[in-house]
Amino acid sequence: MNEIQPRYVGFWARFGAFLIDSILASIVLAPFGRLYFGLADVDPFRLLDDLLKLLSPVNLFYNAVLPAIALILFWIFRQASPGKMVIGAKIVDEKTLGKPTTGQMIGRYFGYYLSTFVFLLGFFWVGWDARKQGWHDKLAGTLVIRSR
């Protein structure tokens, strides 16, 4: 029986997808930042004020919660972020190569924190792993493969 092997997406392609996603997120969030923080002037007497704004629930929502929800929804409905779509990649379940569950996608997102925690080692792991899995992929039981 001749089983077709998936084509795993490696570190540099995934890094390119990350850059595309980051640029798109910045474009979407920049107008809010401009409204909320104003022009980027440095005023030492307003540093505490600016720090309090950074730690505010409004800032946390727009810069952490909203992007997380958007990314997870892309993963659930498209099996890819916009950057992964551009490079022709998709997220699949590692056992079935089918669509991952919503729980896997949410777990994968929170696995990003683990991948980030130790000097980004969980992301660099993609470059060394035989199936190109980062720690977040291993944790969620997912793979990133070529969709075309």
Image (cartoon, grey):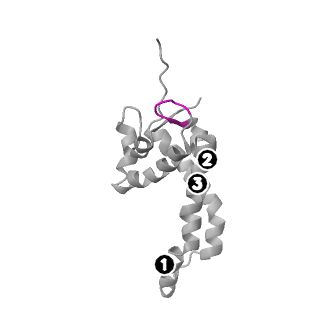
Q: Earlier in the sequence, mark 2 or mark 1?
A: 1
Check residue 95 for magenta coloring.
yes
Q: Which amino acid does label 3 sit on?
A: Ile
Hey, which quadrant is residue 87 in on the image? top right
Pick the front one: 115 or 76: 76
Q: Which of 17 and 39 is in front in this view?
A: 17
For the residue pair 69 and 90, the one nearer the viewer reads as 69
| Residue 16 shows in this picture | yes
The residue to which callout 3 is attached is 23
Q: Pointers 3 and 1 in contact (CB under 8 A)?
A: no
Expressed as whole percent of the image width and height from the top left, the position of residue 122 reads 37, 47
* Residue plotted at (39% across, 51% down): 115
Q: Could you tell whether 61 is left or right of 128 in the image?
A: right
Distance from Cα at disc 3 to Cα at disc 1: 24 Å
Label 2: which secondary element: helix
Whether residue 141 appears in magenta in the rendering, the answer is no
Q: Which amino acid does label 1 sit on?
A: Leu
Q: In the displayed structure, would residue 66 be above or below residue 105?
A: below
Residue 116 placed where, x, y %? 40, 54
Q: Is residue 122 left or right of residue 29?
A: left
Vertical order, 141 against 54 (above or below): above
Residue at 62% across, 63% down: 29
Q: Do the residues labelled 2 and 3 touch (CB within 8 Å)?
A: no
**Callout 2, which amino acid?**
Phe
**Residue at (53%, 63%) from the top-left corner?**
64
Query: Residue at 56% of width from left, 64% of height from top?
Result: 63
In the rendered image, which residue does mark 1 sit on? 51
Where is mark 2, residue-wise? 74
The magenta-colored residue range is 90-98
Q: In which quarter of the image is residue 128?
A: top left
